[in-house]
Image (tube, rainbow, N blue to C red):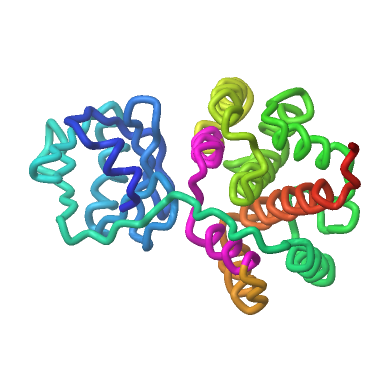
Amino acid sequence: MSTEIGRILDEPRRLSIHSVFDSAVNLRAGRRLITCTTRAISVPNGLEMARSDLAGLQRLRFTTPREILEWSPDGRVLASRTSAMAIASTPETLVFETALPAATGNDLHGPATELLAHLARTRARTGLGGDWSALANDVALTSAAESLAAGRADEAVTHWLGRGPGLTPSGDDVLAGMITGLRFVGAIDPSRIGPLRESVDAAAGRLTTDLSAEYLHYACRGMAGGMVRDMLVALDRSDATGVLDALDLLGRHGDTSGMDCALGIVLALRHECDRERRPRVP
């Protein structure tokens, strides 16, 4: 389970089933979603469980779609109110740290440029196309990165919410990558992070899916999945092998979601590197 799940469920909670997929079930816990899966957890809102327990949740969604589940923090058990099903999370459960580390201050221009060149050579497919040179210089995308770096969720940002294919539309995944990259390098003034998160939460709630809104929420809070964390840390260390390994895993996430997020990260790092290289006006 992620460290964030412990905070979401740190007191008795009533939960409901939000959505069901072949390999995951999303639970609604107040304003937050919890993603239950049998895979090793590496997302901020993730809870790993046994395959039989996940199957029980999937069946429950179809037999009793409005069933209420209750979490007992003392017994660390998620139980159905009207059935014998119980899903336990033991004290030995592996806990995944969701908070992004801070970049060390190394110059990321070279690693970011090399990553962009690799993506351009391989023409990795995003939901916005595969021409990475064009995407990296698309004014509509670079303007969004500039607005986010300034702590604004203005029209340049909201233009991308809900745009593109997927359960998490490509535009949202790009924005999540941008925000995560900017937060990693400390490019957003700390005094603006709170208002930015509130603005993004409000806009995402109106313009895109619940799942996308959840990922954007955590990106604004400086939290990211393991593959994204690993890639950013490898970039910071100029570890080319580590970057490609993380990118390979990220590329398997969703249809194009992983590469959409990678595009956002590249745009964010390029924006910050270019800003730092501009002549300072006295």
Residue that lies at the very extreme toward the bottom in this rendered image: 241
Query: What span is colored magenta in the figure?
Result: 213-236
Query: Is residue 224 left or right of 143 when viewed as pictured?
Result: left
What is the x, y in percent for residue 153? 68, 26
**Which of 38 and 190 lies nearest the eye of the viewer?**
190
Residue 164: % across, % down: 72, 40
* Residue appearing at x 66%, y 45% in the figure: 182
For residue 170, above or below residue 234: above
Horizontal side, residue 73 vs residue 239: left or right: left
Q: Is residue 190 magenta?
A: no
Q: Is residue 230 magenta?
A: yes
Main SS, magenta residues:
helix
What residue sits 12% from the left and 32% below the top? Answer: 82
Which quarter of the figure has residue 157? top right
226 to the left or right of 255:
left
User: Total marks drawn?
Assistant: 0
Give me the residue at 38% from left, 57% from top.
Answer: 41
Residue 179 vs 39, above or below: the answer is above
Name which quarter of the figure residue 45 lies in.
top left
Determine the residue located farthest toward the front in the rendered image: 282
* Residue at image point 53% right, 59% down: 229
- Which image quarter holds the C terminus? top right
240 in relation to 17, above or below: below
Residue 87 pos. (x, y %): 18, 48
Of residues 125 and 108, the one nearer the viewer is 108
Q: Nearer the viewer, residue 67 or 173?
A: 173
- Quarter of the figure with residue 151: top right
Where is residue 13 shown, x and y percent of the image? 21, 29
